[in-house]
């Protein structure tokens, strides 16, 4: 109980500082940890790709534990009655900027400034017999000034003696985030613990992001199957790589088009300029030793709006079994 309270206090303490259109998908098979008790930090930044634009930073802190099943928002998570179910909560903060942060003016034809902060409540259901996974997540929070995107980026750039961002007064205005997402994955081919190929479908709806997606995940190396609910056993060492390409079909994105309720944002991208189909690819390398999980990855995303460009970012992940 003392450890649980310490972790929750740590999560809450980060809330004023932590900047989404839900870029961080922590429930998919390539992010699998075969345990029902762990704490994970996921940090993403386009600094890893030597850029400073568009999706510029993301932080996700999560806790997975059986008691989360009794958390009030967990009651809203719909899932099939598979043989194994994990529950988790997390805090997520993401920041978005245009191609130049030194310009104090509205950059017409560029991406708007936007910061988002929300609580993520999720479940992961696994059917080891038919090798399928069903994940559900509900996100509740805020987009806009209250998310602290300006304060976070300004502080980081000051610490690094980097360019001071001047355009945040033009950011998307405050609005509510209530979003619901479901993911379904089915393993197509596997070879023990050394190879896995699965197909994925996703649907998301709410005030922040409305979209659907399809994709595949290829894993190769030596790993615990993400389609087995059993706890990790045997060797203490795992090492593998994964590839996750996919297509997204975009309906609405508040980080570009503004909040659903407050339509007074200084600058947004018109609906007709949003690219309705995007391609995304993620490649990662993972090392697991006993209860420690380490990952490095790179992501690519095609242009999200007609006058935009593709974007590349990277990140690291550290998880510890409890």
Image (cartoon, helix red, strand yellow):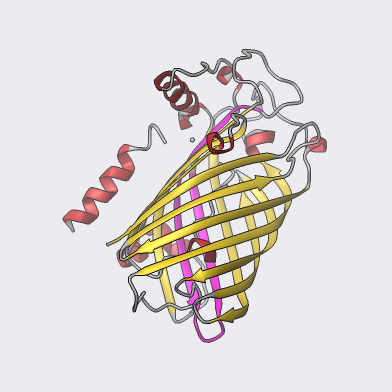
Q: Work out whether 145 lies above or below 140.
A: above
Q: Nearer the viewer, residue 71 or 306?
A: 306
Q: Is residue 227 above or below residue 139?
A: below
Task: Look at the picture and state if 150 lies above or below 249.
Answer: above
Q: Is residue 316 magenta?
A: no
Residue 23 position within the rendered picture, expressed as x and y whole percent measured from the top left: 57, 47
Looking at the rendered image, the quarter that the C terminus falls into is: bottom left
- Report the number of discs: 0
Q: Is residue 126 magenta?
A: yes
Q: Quadrant of the N terminus?
A: bottom left
Residue interval drawn in magenta: 112-140
In the rendered image, the residue lying farthest to the left is 2
Q: Nearer the viewer, residue 77 or 312?
A: 312
Q: Nearer the viewer, residue 176 or 130?
A: 130
At x 47%, y 32%, the residue is: 147
25 to 266, vertically: above or below: below
Residue drawn 34% across and 37% down?
14
Examine the residues drawn in magenta and state their main secondary structure. Answer: strand
At 67% across and 42% down in the image, what residue appears?
253
């Amino acid at each position: 109980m003392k450890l649980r309270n310490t972790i929750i206090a740590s999560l809450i303490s980060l809330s004023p500082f932590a900047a989404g259109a839900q870029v961080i998908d922590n429930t998919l098979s390539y992010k699998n940890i075969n345990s029902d008790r762990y704490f994970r930090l996921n940090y993403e930044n386009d600094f890893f790709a030597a850029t400073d634009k568009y999706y510029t930073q993301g932080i996700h802190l999560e806790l997975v534990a059986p008691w989360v099943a009794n958390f009030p928002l967990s009651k809203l998570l719909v899932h099939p009655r598979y043989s194994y179910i994990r529950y988790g909560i997390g805090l997520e903060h993401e920041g978005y900027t245009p191609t130049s942060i030194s310009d104090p003016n509205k950059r017409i034809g560029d991406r708007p400034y936007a910061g988002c902060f929300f609580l993520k409540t999720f479940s992961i259901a696994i059917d080891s017999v038919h090798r399928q996974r069903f994940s559900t997540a509900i996100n509740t929070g805020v987009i806009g000034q209250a998310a602290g995107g300006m304060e976070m980026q300004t502080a980081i750039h000051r610490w690094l003696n980097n360019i001071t961002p001047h355009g945040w007064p033009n950011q998307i205005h405050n609005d509510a985030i209530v979003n619901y997402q479901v993911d379904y994955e089915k393993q197509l081919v596997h070879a023990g613990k050394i190879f896995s190929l699965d197909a994925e479908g996703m649907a998301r709806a709410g005030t922040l992001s409305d979209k659907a997606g399809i994709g595949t995940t290829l894993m190769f190396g030596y790993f615990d199957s993400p389609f087995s609910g059993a706890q990790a056993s045997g060797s203490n060492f795992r090492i593998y790589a994964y590839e996750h390409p996919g297509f997204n079909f975009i309906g609405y994105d508040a980080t570009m088009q503004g909040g659903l309720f407050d339509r007074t944002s200084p600058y947004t991208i018109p609906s007709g300029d949003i690219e309705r189909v995007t391609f995304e690819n993620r490649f990662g390398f993972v090392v697991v030793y006993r209860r420690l999980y380490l990952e490095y990855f790179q992501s690519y995303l095609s242009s999200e709006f007609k006058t935009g460009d593709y974007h590349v970012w990277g990140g690291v992940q550290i998880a510890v079994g409890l």
